[in-house]
Image (tube, helix red, strand yellow):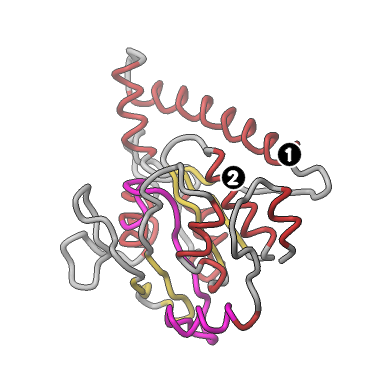
Amino acid sequence: MHAELIHARGYDTDQPTITKELIVSAQETVGYDKDKQNIVFAGNVNVGKSSLINALCDKGGNDDGAARVGSIQATMGITRHEIPNHPEMLLYDIPGARTQDVPAFQYYHDQMLYAFDTVVLVHDTTLTQADIRLLKMCILSNQKCLAVRTKSDDHIRNYEYDKECNNLEEARQIFLSEIRQDIERCQEQIAASWPEREVQVRDYVVSSRSVRSFMRQNASPKDAATAYIDELDFAFALSPTLVVNVDN
C-alpha cells in the first residue's frame, strides 16, 4: 500500500505501510485460519456488532461463547465465533472505535483489520465520513468489505411513534424509502470522491432478530418491524453457503 495514496485520501499516520510480513504476523496474533473464511465485524461502539454475530451464530447474549452485548459490556479484545453447521467460516468480534473521531487508518491498523479476508462494517445510522474512509482502507488493501445497517426493527418502531404513523407497515415503508435514499446518497459520495475506481459498497439493512430468524431457516416474520429486508442478501454476501431454502 503506497503512503502517497493513503495521504491523498486524508489519512494521517506515521506508519502507513502494511507489509506482507506485518499481515502474516497479525494473522498469527488473531488466530487466522487459512482453511476458513475469516470475517471480522468492525465499527463504532454500540452499533450492534456483537448482537449481529450472536444472531448469525444463533446464540443469546447470555449463552456460553456468545459475543458480549450491552452498553457496559463492550468487547475488550478480539474473540472468535463459529456458526453452527458452517465450519468453513470464522467470525471475529473486535472492540469498537469508541468515537467517530478515531482516524480510519488508526482503527484499521490498531485492530489489525488487514489480517482478515472480509471486513464487515456495522453501523446503525447513516454512513459517516469515518465509516466511508474505513471502507476505502479495505478497498485499498484489496479486501472484500460489506456495510450493514442494523437495528432496523427498532428504527421502524421509532418511526411509527416519531412520524405519527397509523401502523407499523406505514412506518416500515417510510423508513425504507428514507433509508434507500440515504444509501444512494452515500454511494454517490463514495463514487464522487474516488472517480478513478468504480467503487460499489452495498449497505445491507437488517435487524439482529431477523438475522437470527433467517439463520433458523424460518419464513419472514409477519410483524412489519421484523419482516426480512436485506437479511437474505446479507447472508449470501457473507457466504453463499449460509443461504438455504427459506420461504421469504
Q: Quadrant of residue 95?
A: bottom left
Q: Amino acid at mark 2?
A: Ile
Residue sitting at x 31%, y 55%: 51
Callout 1 secondary element = helix
The residue where tag 1 is placed is: 193
Residue 24 included in the magenta stretch of the image: yes
x and y percentages locating residue 214 in the rendered image: 39, 56
Residue sitting at x 73%, y 48%: 8
Callout 2 secondary element = helix
Q: Find the residue positioned furthest to the right.
A: 196
Query: Alpha-carbon distance for marks 1 and 2?
Result: 10 Å
The residue where tag 2 is placed is: 132
Foreground residue among 213 and 149: 149
Q: Amino acid at mark 1?
A: Ser
- Identify the magenta region: 22-50
Residue sitting at x 21%, y 56%: 73
Residue 238 included in the magenta stretch of the image: no
Foreground residue among 153 and 95: 95
